[in-house]
Amino acid sequence: MITKNIKEFKLKIPENVTLVAVSKTKPIEDLQEAYDAGQRVFGENKIQEMVDKYDALPKDIQWHMIGHLQSNKVKYMAHFVDLIHGVDKFKTLKEINKQAKKHDRIINCLLQAKIAKEDTKFGLTFDEIAEILNSKEILELTHIKIAGFMGMATFTDNQEQLAEEFSLLKTFFDTQKQQTKIHNCHLEILSMGMSGDYELAIKNGSTMIRVGSSIFGHRNYNY
Ligand SMILES: *Cc1c(COP(=O)(O)O)cnc(C)c1O
């Protein structure tokens, strides 16, 4: 199943869109199967779980942290994490920078934008993102790269609403991409779309989709 799903996804998504296989809660064997089918980018939302899987699996995997971050845990993944999707505080950027420096690395980060109408989701408003990108403090962070933005749409079937949320973020992304000219910010990635809404996200400019259940099947408990 997993092998077939990975192969189908590779065929159906455009070349410029990266597929992040969201493997949270899934056992090592499932990730290995996806790896054997050619998948190299995996997303996890708990740091300890990601560390355990990193230790057990081939080292050419790119590990993405897609969950909400606790600053005090950044140190456990600083030596290998490839991209951190859910940064929604300047303080977290500072901590990532500090930990990356210890390992002489530059860690790629996405700022998480609040696009959903629900207030349960984390994220920064567009104004808050602009404020961070225009701040003096960000210039001092030599060991991070802001590689783009991440957004999670409202949990709804309303296609119009989803499309609107995605396209608002895409427009904001394009504007910031044009305007932001700082050394540690190269806006290339727009991470939007999950199993239920990735097609719409791609139509509205996503360059990175985070897909869990459509690859690995349903998760037993709700994360
Ligand atoms: C779990 C999760 C996903 C994947 O969700 P599916 O609906 O299973 O594809 C994507 N993004 C984030 C941030 C997640 O936590």
Image (spheres, grey):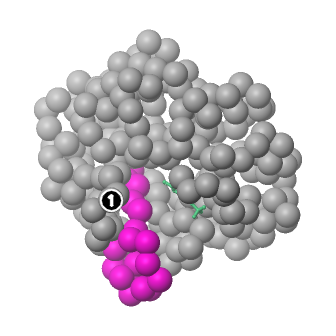
Could you tell me which secondary element the residue under label 1 belongs to? loop
Tell me: 131 left or right of 5: left
**Image: 11 above or below 208:** below
Snapshot quadrant of residue 92: top left
Residue 133, quarter of the rendered image? top left
Q: Residues within 10 Å of mark 1 (few under 14, many from 20)?
A: few
Residue at horizontal 84 percent and vertical 49 percent from the top:
33
| Quadrant into which the N terminus falls | bottom right
Q: Residue furthest front?
A: 221
Where's residue 14, x and y in %? 63, 69
User: For residue 108, what is the image quadrant?
Assistant: top left
Residue visible at 29% across and 71% down in the picture? 117
The image quadrant where one finds ligand 1 is bottom right
Q: Residue at x 51, y 66 (%)?
A: 193
Specify whether residue 179 is painted magenta. no
In the rendering, at what x and y percent does residue 218 appear? 69, 63
How many numbered discs? 1
Q: Amino acid at mark 1?
A: Thr
Residue 201 location (% of width, % of height): 48, 72
Q: Which residue is mark 1?
A: 120
